[in-house]
Image (spheres, helix red, strand yellow):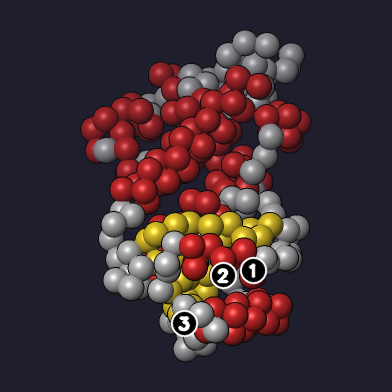
Amino acid sequence: MNDNDYSTDCTSPILIRDMALDQRPRERAIKHGIKTLGDAELMAVIFATGIKGKSVVTLCEEMLEEKGGHLSLLSRMTVKEICEQFKGIGPAKAVSLLAALELGSRAAADAASMMSDTPLTSSQRAYDRIRWRLERLDHEEFWAILMSRSGRELRQLKIGQGALSSTVVDVRQLVRAALDCQASSLILFHNHPSGTLMPSPQDDSTTRKIKEACKLFDITVNDHIIITDSDFYSYHDNGRM
């Protein structure tokens, strides 16, 4: 297939240039800025063409509606899954969409790396620093940021990876790494792919276990932050640290 990847009943796609001028996402972005476009319009700029009887914007709106409006759910799909689930979307379009979503994720990671010298003095700063690692995953991962006495980042460390709803955490690895880099404090992070923000009893137990282990070496656990695709929960902010 080529860039006009449509099934046999989806010929003669509607082009953006065939739309009314004030409805064209590209022209609106040029005039008013890219941030004025909605998610479906941004997707439409990437796709450029729709399918027979359906404009590219409508096509993208329907794709988003199918995923409850969550771009993050689209980003978790494979090229094959996108092509199979959405009639009229071929490999070229699917790859273009996933490439754009991945580029956005990498831009967020780059922005976070540029902030590495900024002290982590709030849950929001901590969340912004590491969210790119944990958003959009289809499994749980457990991370920690090890910090100096002044609150500056020394190292980011993955200490566990699991399935959809659980993670086995290597507490010894965490303590050993903290001692190796002479960390005075740390912040814990893990994600909930299900989208549930509230901590589970297992989350509480893991937090207590890590706090007790770190306390033996005078290392303070400042916070434990749970990350979903759109928000976060802070133990510290909720008075639970």
Question: Type of residue at label 3?
Answer: Asp
Mark drawn on residue 11:
none
The mark nearer the N terminus, 3 or 2, is 2
Q: Residues within 10 Å of mark 2 (few under 14, many from 20)?
A: some
Residue 200, image x and y in percent? 68, 78
Which residue appears at 33% of the width and 73% of the height?
Answer: 149
Reading the image, the residue beneath label 1 is: 172
Residue 30, image x and y in percent? 26, 30
Reading the image, the residue beneath label 3 is: 218
Q: How many marks?
A: 3
State the SS at label 2.
helix
State the SS at label 3.
loop
**Foreground pick, 75 / 211:** 211
Distance of label 3 from label 2 (alpha carbons):
11 Å
The answer to whether mark 2 and mark 1 are in CB contact below 8 A is yes
Q: Residues within 10 Å of mark 3 (few under 14, many from 20)?
A: few
Which residue appears at 59% of the width and 80% of the height?
Answer: 213
Tell me: residue 60, above or below residue 193.
above
Reading the image, the residue beneath label 2 is: 175
Q: Is 83 left, or right, of 216 in this rendering?
A: right
Residue 180, image x and y in percent? 49, 62
The mark nearer the N terminus, 1 or 3, is 1
The answer to whether mark 1 and mark 3 are in CB contact below 8 A is no
Question: Type of residue at label 1?
Answer: Arg
Q: Quadrant of residue 22?
A: top left
**Foreground pick, 58 / 189:** 189
Tell me: residue 49, above or below residue 155.
above
**Foreground pick, 78 / 54:** 78
Question: Type of residue at label 2?
Answer: Val
Which residue appears at 36% of the width and 48% of the height?
Answer: 113
